[in-house]
Amino acid sequence: MTEKVAVLGTGKIGEALLSGMIRGGWSPSDLLVTARRPERAEELRSRHGVEAVSNAEAAKSADTLILTVKPQDMGALLDELAPHIPADRLVISGAAGIPTSFFEARLAAGTPVVRVMTNTPALVDEAMSVISAGSHATEEHLAHTEAIFGGVGKTLRVPESQQDAATALSGSGPAYFYFLVEAMTDAGILLGLPRDKAHDLIVQAAIGAAVMLRDSDQHPVKLREAVTSPAGTTINAIRELESHGVRAALIAALEAARDRSRELASGNG
Ligand SMILES: NC(=O)C1=CN([C@@H]2O[C@H](COP(=O)(O)OP(=O)(O)OC[C@H]3O[C@@H](n4cnc5c(N)ncnc54)[C@H](O)[C@@H]3O)[C@@H](O)[C@H]2O)C=CC1
Ligand SMILES: O=C(O)[C@@H]1CCC=N1
């Protein structure tokens, strides 16, 4: 019998994962989705050829349930699902902040729960999905979760105590890079470049730097030193970044994201 996977609350992250699973070879007939609005259900049906069902129906018929609603909506979704989920089903949460104990307290005793923090580059199969086991999840459940999320990028197992930090780094991480690109493009405008050219220059610099970071085996400090010539241009820019406290700002920003993830833990946010 083939396995059925349901994505419940299929918004941005749910759809990114769903589309990646289909690109990776899952048959749409083995996938179910749920959505709050009928128009959204129809959109998902027509875009991906999957069946859209009610939350209760997904809970009854899927072997693996992937919950991708906002943290603040998770309590209400679980109230709706709990009476219908048999205890042997794997429940995967994609929500920021909410601990596996939140799910375990609301589902049948012994339900295996896995917490995953992925990110939007799932849309281009370059996600980072950080995975932690709840108290009833086995090696098999973790391996199964890795197989699902491995289709849209890399996976990494961490103890659940590191999930809030991982959320600050990689869950939110793409936003910081988009923010930098936006700010650097503005700088290009200030320096007199047309916006489209400034954008292209910065994006290609970002891609080149990302590939070097991933593939060169060199520490980021070494890579930066190689760009920074004595009495050259780069060191003048670095001095400005340091004097404006950009390093401290990044540390404070990620700490704030980690703290917010902790605050979301109750699900009431
Ligand atoms: N957007 C991002 O970059 C990332 C988001 N996440 C997590 O993914 C989750 C979803 O985030 P997004 O996709 O950005 O939000 P979203 O708002 O695009 O998607 C959530 C969807 O859930 C639906 N929904 C809410 N309650 C429902 C219910 N009872 N039944 C059926 N559908 C319901 C909403 O209508 C919405 O379409 C959040 O928990 C967030 O923490 C995780 C990693 C990255
Ligand atoms: O901003 C958020 O809360 C979500 C979780 C990680 C990325 N986006």
Image (cartoon, rainbow, N blue to C red):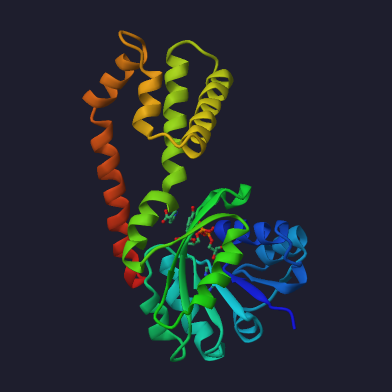
Q: Quadrant of residue 143?
A: bottom right
Q: How many marks?
A: 0
Q: In which quarter of the image is the N terminus?
A: bottom right
Q: In this view, does 22 lie above or below 233?
A: below
Counting from the top left corner in percent of width and height, residue 172 is at 42, 50
| In-image side of 257 versus 207 (left or right) | left
| Ligand 2: image quarter | bottom left
Q: Is residue 48 above or below residue 202?
A: below
Using the rendered image of the protein, determine whether residue 269 is visible from the camera's viewpoint. no
Q: Which of the pair 36/83 is nearer the observer?
A: 83
Residue under the point 38% across and 35% down: 219
Residue under the point 62% across and 47% down: 124
Q: Is residue 119 above or below residue 203?
A: below
Residue under the point 35% across and 22% down: 225
- The outermost residue toward the front is 217
Counting from the top left corner in percent of width and height, residue 168 is at 36, 52
Q: Quadrant of the C terminus?
A: bottom left
Residue under the point 27% across and 34% down: 247
Using the rendered image of the protein, determine whether residue 246 is visible from the camera's viewpoint. yes
Counting from the top left corner in percent of width and height, residue 150 is at 58, 59
